[in-house]
């Protein structure tokens, strides 16, 4: 089976990539499987910049093809926050529940019609000897007044999807993976990944 390395230490993302890639015939490896893997500093001001930083840093370190994922929540009433700071919104320790609570507090008193938001996922594909490419995907929703659901990760319990009548955390894995920002981005990356792998083989 073909293997693809994802430059992430996020368990929720890792699980999603495994399910998304399995039907395509790929086995997924992440930085959670690699001992002493380095932390990539996310110094970019856009999701794309950070996805590139993750993918290129790890591609250079491992000498293989790598996918970087930088994603987050964009809330209209908060002028796009937490945005690229989604993981550390309530502090450096990256606490999903605390991040979610902070968004709910900041939206206190904001009416339902003004609680529009979207998840954004930028994916970068890099290898030591090919030009890096990026793609992106989004999914539209609204921020609820309190968390609901146990599935998924991050801000999923407060992200309500009108078409489903449920929060992202109330969807089963298959449902999230059919509509998520990550799934939309990955669909755009599929063909590019095949080309990358072919070119890599030709070089060997
Ligand atoms: O950088 P890596 O190692 O990949 O892991 P991370 O958790 O730091 O990931 P990001 O820098 O991309 O930050 C993304 C944050 O946005 C949130 N997020 C991203 N995708 C999400 C999803 O599908 N559902 C809910 N929240 C999500 C989540 O809270 C993450 O902490
Ligand atoms: Mg991160």
Image (cartoon, helix red, strand yellow):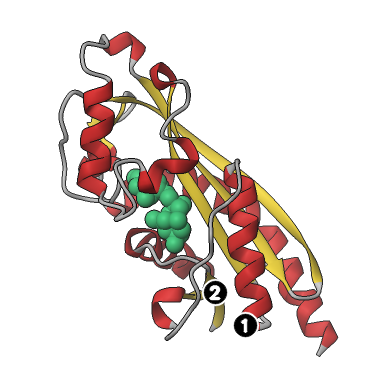
Which quadrant of the structure image shows residue 118? Answer: top left
**Closest to the observer, 113 or 173:** 113
**Closest to the observer, 143 or 100:** 100
**Closest to the observer, 177 or 120:** 120
Assess whether mark 2 and mark 1 are in contact (beta carbons under 8 angstroms): yes
Q: Secondary structure at mark 1?
A: helix
At 74% from the left edge and 69% from the top edge, which residue is drawn?
196
Question: Where does residue 21 sit, x and y in percent of width and height?
Answer: 48, 66
At 71% from the left edge and 75% from the top edge, which residue is drawn?
197
Q: Is residue 121 left or right of residue 82?
A: right
Residue receiving disc 1: 62
At 16% from the left edge and 48% from the top edge, which residue is drawn?
150
Against 53, residue 103 (above or below) is above
Can residue 165 be seen from the camera position used here? no
Can residue 94 be seen from the camera position used here? yes
**Closest to the observer, 176 or 98:** 98
Q: Is residue 168 left or right of residue 1?
A: left
């Amino acid at each position: 089976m073909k293997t693809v390395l994802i430059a992430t230490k996020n368990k929720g993302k890792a699980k999603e990539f495994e399910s998304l890639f399995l039907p395509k015939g790929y086995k997924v490896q992440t930085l959670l499987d690699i001992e002493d893997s380095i932390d990539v500093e996310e110094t970019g001001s856009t999701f794309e910049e950070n996805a590139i930083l993750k993918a290129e840093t790890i591609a250079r370190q491992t000498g293989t093809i790598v996918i970087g994922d930088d994603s987050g929540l964009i809330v209209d009433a908060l002028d796009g926050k937490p945005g690229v700071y989604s993981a550390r919104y309530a502090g450096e320790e990256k606490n999903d529940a605390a991040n979610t609570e902070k968004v709910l507090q900041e939206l206190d008193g904001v009416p339902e019609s003004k609680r529009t938001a979207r998840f954004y996922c930028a994916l970068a594909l890099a290898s030591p000897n090919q030009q890096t490419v990026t793609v992106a995907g989004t999914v539209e929703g609204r921020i609820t007044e309190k968390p609901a659901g146990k599935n998924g990760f991050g801000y999923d319990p407060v992200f309500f999807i009108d078409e489903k009548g449920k929060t992202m955390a109330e969807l089963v894995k298959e449902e999230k993976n059919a509509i998520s920002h990550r799934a939309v981005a990955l669909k755009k990356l599929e063909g590019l990944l095949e080309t990358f792998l072919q070119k890599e083989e030709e070089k060997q």
